[in-house]
Amino acid sequence: MAVESYDFGPYKIHHSSVFHTTDLSFAFVNLRPAVTGHILFNIYESYLTTKLHVLICPKREVKRVADLTDDENIELWRIAHKLGRQLESYHNASSLTFCIQDGPHAGQSVPHVHIHILPRKNGDYENNDDIYDEINEKEKELKKKLEVDVERKDRSLEEMAQEADEYRKFVF
């Protein structure tokens, strides 16, 4: 039987947003991404301008990096390494930002270890390090949304599923 959703801390990630799984981890598209890009979404080579930003996390709910098993740690970085290379190529990017916010005082809004991967291009942010402010802001918005259930300004499940479908085509 197929998995309907994946646990991400106290939240559920719909299976259509997940594009890669292993015994220990899963990768999914972000609800509130931080980098603009284009996704090829049909056979007529139509592109959807969207935000790019994926997450990788262990299937086991682990709050802090120090609590990962050696196998989970190795698996997360193995996937980040391969997936990062593929995302960079797919999006014609020139760099990648990998980010982990380890604990609430580091900006972690979901208490479940996760690696952010963002394909980067020249000029996507005026100052390269502004990406971290953007990630922090998106995390705060997400936390506020989840806590008080304000009206969503997030991407739709359909938009996220389209992006995940594209990534499933090239994920190892």
Image (cartoon, rainbow, N blue to C red):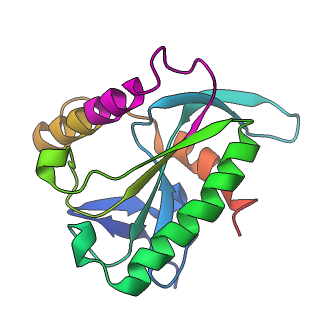
Q: Is residue 14 left or right of residue 107?
A: right
* Along the line of sight, the residue nearer the viewer: 110 or 126: 126
Q: Is residue 16 visible?
A: yes
For residue 166, above or below residue 118: below
Decide whether residue 60 is among the magenta residues.
no
Region in magenta? 119-138
Q: Position of residue 55 (x, y in %)?
A: 45, 54
Decide whether residue 125 is among the magenta residues.
yes
Q: Is residue 166 visible?
A: no
* Along the line of sight, the residue nearer the viewer: 50 or 73: 73
Q: How many numbered discs sit on the rendered protein?
A: 0
For residue 57, above or below residue 28: below
Quarter of the figure with residue 94: top right
Quarter of the figure with residue 14: bottom left
* Along the line of sight, the residue nearer the viewer: 89 or 45: 89
Rendered residue at 38%/73% (across/down): 58
Rendered residue at 50%/68% (across/down): 77
Q: Is residue 95 left or right of residue 169?
A: left
Q: Position of residue 43 (x, y in %)?
A: 87, 41
Q: Position of residue 74 (x, y in %)?
A: 47, 77
Rendered residue at 20%/67% (across/down): 63
Q: Position of residue 136 (x, y in %)?
A: 27, 35
Q: Residue furthest right?
A: 44
Rendered residue at 49%/57% (across/down): 28
The quadrant of the rendering that contains the C terminus is bottom right
